[in-house]
Image (spheres, rainbow, N blue to C red):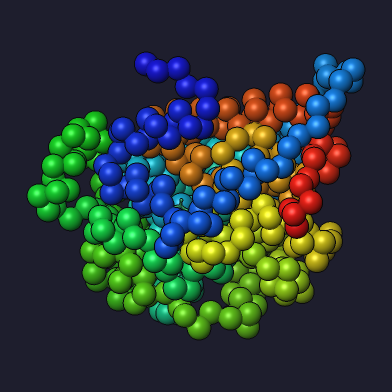
Amino acid sequence: MPVITTIDDLKQMHRRRAPKMFFDYCESGSWTEQTFRENTSDFDKLRLRQRIAVDMSDRTLRSTMIGQDVTMPVALAPVGMTGMQCADGEIKAARAARDFGVPYTLSTMSICSIEDVARATKAPFWFQLYVMRDAEFVDNIIRRAKHAGCDALVLTLDLQLLGQRHKDLRNGLSAPPKLTPRTVLNLATKWRWGLEMLQTKNRSFGNIVGHARSASDMSSLSSWTAEQFEPKLDWDMVARLKEKWGGRLILKGILDPEDAVRAADLGCDAIVVSNHGGRQLDGALSAIRMLPAIVAAVGDRVEVLMDSGIRSGQDILKARALGAHGVMIGRAYIYGLGAMGQAGVTKALQILYKEMDLTMALCGKRDVADVDRDILLIPKDFS
Ligand code: FNR
C-alpha cells in the first residue's frame, strides 16, 4: 500500500485504477488546455508570508457556506459521470462529504440518480442543474430535487454548448463504455474497476435515462449534449428558474465582473467564480486571477465561492485571502474516489484540511475567518 500524503498521490493511483477513457475525461481541459494548466500554475505565483511568534495553540477552520455550518469552507463540486470513476461513485462521495461535514453537489449528469443518493445518504445535498431544451424535464428534475430534500440548487451557466475536449473525442467517451477492441483491451487491465461495476446497477445516467423525453442515444456524450442542452439560456430564464426552485440558489460558472453583478442583482445566495476547471472556454483567464475583480465588483452583496485549479489546502487559503468565502473542489476529490472509493474522498478532504490548518498557522492566523490578503505576497501583474 503506497503512502498517500498529497492530492497528486491520489491522482497517480486514480490513473492506475480507472479505465483510460474515464481518467482522461477527468484530467482533460478543452482545446489547447491553456486555461486548464493556468488554473493550477497561477496559484503557484501567489506566495505566502511566513509569520512567527504568534500563539498557535487554538485553531479553527470551521465556517459557513450559504448559511450552513461546515468543517472547512469547501464543497464537493458537481462532476458528471462520477459513478464511472468508481462504482456508485456519487453515493460514496456524498457519504464521505456528509461524514466530514462539507456539502456535496450532485450533477445532473450523474450516474446514480437524485433518489439513489438521497436514499443512501439520508442527508441533504446540493443539486446542480444543467438547463435542457426539454422544459418538462427541467420542471420535473427541479421537483425531484425538492422532493429529495436538496437544500440548494447550483445552476451551471457556463455550459450551454460543450467545449471541445479532444481526449474525449479520441476516446469515444460514453457511459457505459462502448465495447470496441481498444476499450475491451483497456478494461481488461482494470479488473478491480470492472468487478465493482458488475456489482452495481448504476451504470448509466440515472437522472436522465428514462426521464428526459429525447434521451435515446447517450452513446456519444458530445453529440448528445449538443442535441439536449438549451442554447437559449439567458438571464430571463435564470430568473424564471429561480422562481420555480424557490430555495437557496447558487449560480456557477461566473468569470466576469459584469456577469457577477447581474447575478447579484438577481438575488441569488452565492456565485461560483469558475471556468469549469478549464473545460469550456480555453484561453479564458484562470479563476483565481479573475477572483479579485469579481469580489471588488459585487462587494458583500452575494457570497462568492470559487473553483478551478484547487489541488491543496494552500490553494484554498489563497482563494480565501483574495476574497472567496469558500471553494468547490472537483478533480481533487475525484482523484481520491478513482483511487480508493469513499475512503479516497475522505483522504482527499483530510489532506486538504491538514494543509490548510498548518499553512494558516505558519502564516500567523488561528481562525480561517481572519485569513485575508495579509497572508499573501501578490505579484504586480496579478489582477
Ligand atoms: C466537471 N464540472 C462540472 N460542472 C457542473 O456544473 N456539472 C457537471 O456535470 C460537471 N462535470 C464535470 C466533470 C468533470 C470530470 C470535471 C473535472 C469537472 C466542473 C466542476 O464542477 C468544477 O467546476 C471543476 O471541476 C473545478 O475545477 P477543478 O477543481 O477540477 O480544477
Residue, far front: 380
Say which quadrant the C terminus sits in: bottom right
Answer with left or right where residue 21 lies relative to residue 275. Answer: left
Q: Is residue 133 visible?
A: yes
Residue, far left: 181
Q: Give the percent coordinates (x, y) of residue 71.
A: 68, 34
Q: Give the percent coordinates (x, y) of residue 118.
A: 47, 48
Say which quadrant the N terminus sits in: top left
Q: Is residue 245 above or below residue 288?
A: below
Count of residue discs: 0
Answer with left or right where residue 237 lies relative to residue 213. Answer: right
Frontmost residue, 188 versus 71: 188
Answer with left or right where residue 61 lies relative to residue 99. Answer: right
Q: Is residue 124 above or below residue 32?
A: above
Residue at the image point whose x is 34% and y is 60% from the top: 166
Frontmost residue, 127 versus 225: 225
**Residue 258 occupies which quadrant of the picture?**
bottom right
Residue at the image point whose x is 63% and y is 56% from the top: 287
Residue at the image point whose x is 30% and y is 38% from the top: 18
**Residue 243 occupies which quadrant of the picture?**
bottom right
Q: Give the percent coordinates (x, y) of residue 69.
A: 72, 41
Frontmost residue, 316 versus 91: 316
Q: Is residue 132 visible?
A: no
Residue at the image point whose x is 58% and y is 64% from the top: 284
Q: Is residue 295 above or below residue 198?
A: below
Answer with left or right where residue 51 lies relative to residue 333. Answer: right
Q: Give the percent coordinates (x, y) of residue 294.
A: 75, 62
